[in-house]
Amino acid sequence: LKDIEFIRSNYYNKLEIARFDSNVDKYVGYTEFGVKQAEYFNSIPSYIGAMKAQREAYCQHNIGVY
């Protein structure tokens, strides 16, 4: 499970604005608006905890599928 990466990307108009990466354990913004979104999401500990839990819930469950 250590080499598995969970990524959740937010797009607007086909442009990636922000991304949660389980290796970094936080949101990273790629546009001006995305940086603001990332700062907001990172300021909510329960939301970041839920994103971290998605790695185990989603990725570990599907290891044998692929």
Image (cartoon, rainbow, N blue to C red):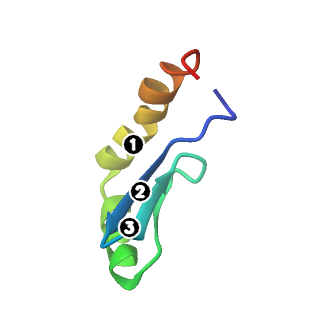
Q: How many badges with numbers are in the image?
A: 3
Q: Between marks 1 and 2, how big is the CA–CA gap?
A: 12 Å
Q: Is residue 55 left or right of residue 33?
A: right
Q: Measuring 42% from the left and 33% from the top, which residue is drawn there?
A: 53
**Image quadrant for the C terminus?**
top right
Return the x and y of residue 12 as percentages of the image width and height.
Answer: 30, 70
Return the x and y of residue 2 as percentages of the image width and height.
Answer: 67, 32
Residue 43 position (above or below residue 53): below
Q: Between marks 3 and 2, how big is the CA–CA gap?
A: 11 Å
In this rendered view, identify the residue nearer to me: 14 or 24: 14
Element at label 1: helix
Return the x and y of residue 6 as percentages of the image width and height.
Answer: 51, 41
> Could you tell me the amino acid type at mark 1?
Met
Q: Earlier in the sequence, mark 3 or mark 2?
A: 2
Tag 3 residue: 38
Q: Which mark is residue 9?
A: 2
Asked if the residues shown at circle 1 and circle 2 are in contact, with their CB atoms under 8 angstroms apart, the answer is: no
> Could you tell me the amino acid type at mark 2?
Ser
